[in-house]
C-alpha cells in the first residue's frame, strides 16, 4: 500500500507506539489488520486518499485452457477474513468483456484467475471455481460485473 520494504515497516513499528499491533503471522513474517494499517498510514501522511481508483486486471483461464485478460474500471476487491468465505471483485466492464468473462466462468467448474492485479494488493492467483454472480447495467449504460471465488483458493500469483 505504501510501496515500501520490510525495513521501513520494521522502523515504523519500532518508532511509533501507535502503529497497529500484529494480528497474526510470525515474528519474521508478521501480518496486520488491513483497515488499521490504512488508517495509520493515512494519519501519518504515508499514503494519500485515492481520488480515482485505477483499473483491476484479471487474467481468467477457462475451459480448454482458453485465456483472456480483462479490464475492470473502478474496481472493488473484498477479501474475506475467514477460509470459509468468498472473495469478491466487481468493476465496470465493456459489454464484450462481460460476455466473454461470463462464458469463461460458466458451465463446468474450474475457471481460474491466473493473475489478478488490483489496487492495494499484491498480485493474486485463484486456483479455481471463479464465477460471475452479477452483471448490473446502470442507467448510464455502464455494465458492472461481479466475480466471486472461495477464499480458500486464493494465493499469490507467480511473478511474470
Image: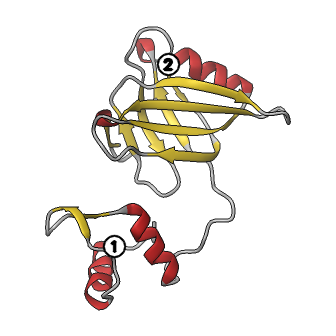
Residue at 47% of width from left, 72% of height from top?
39
Is tag 1's residue or tag 2's residue first in the polypeptide sequence?
Answer: 1
| Image point (14%, 63%), residue name | 26
Position above or below: 23 against 76? below
Gap in Å between the C-alphas at discs 1 and 2? 36 Å
Residue nearest the observer in this picture, 95 or 142? 142
The spot of residue 160 in percent (x, y) is 39, 45
Image coords of residue 110 (percent x, y)? 37, 18
Estimate how packed mark 2 is, as few (under 14), some (14 to 19) or many (20 or more) residues with alpha carbons within 10 Å: many
Give the residue drawn at x 40%, y 70%: 37
For the residues carrying marks 1 and 2, which lies nearer the camera in this image? Answer: 2
Q: Residue furthest right?
A: 140
Horizontal and vertical percent position of residue 105: 49, 19
Q: Residues within 10 Å of mark 1 (few under 14, many from 20)?
A: few
Q: Are marks 1 and 2 in contact (CB under 8 Å)?
A: no
Which label sits on residue 5?
1
Specify the label residue 60 is tagged with: none
The mark found on residue 105 in the picture is 2
Q: Secondary structure at mark 1?
A: loop
Amino acid at each position: 500500500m505504501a510501496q515500501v520494504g520490510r525495513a521501513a515497516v520494521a522502523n515504523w513499528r519500532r518508532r511509533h507506539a501507535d502503529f497497529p499491533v500484529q494480528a497474526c503471522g510470525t515474528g519474521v513474517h508478521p501480518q496486520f489488520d488491513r483497515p488499521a494499517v490504512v488508517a495509520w498510514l493515512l494519519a501519518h501522511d504515508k499514503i494519500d486518499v485515492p481520488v480515482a481508483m485505477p483499473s483491476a486486471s484479471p487474467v481468467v483461464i477457462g475451459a480448454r485452457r482458453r485465456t483472456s485478460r480483462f479490464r475492470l474500471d473502478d474496481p472493488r476487491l473484498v477479501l474475506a477474513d475467514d477460509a470459509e468465505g468468498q472473495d469478491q471483485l466487481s468493476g465496470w466492464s465493456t459489454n464484450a468483456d462481460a460476455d466473454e468473462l461470463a462464458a469463461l466462468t460458466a458451465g463446468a467448474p474450474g475457471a481460474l484467475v491466473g493473475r489478478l492485479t488490483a489496487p492495494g494488493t499484491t498480485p493474486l492467483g485463484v486456483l479455481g471455481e471463479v464465477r460471475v454472480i452479477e452483471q448490473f447495467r446502470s442507467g448510464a449504460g455502464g455494465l458492472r460485473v461481479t466475480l466471486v471465488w472461495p477464499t480458500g483458493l486464493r494465493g499469490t500469483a507467480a511473478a511474470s
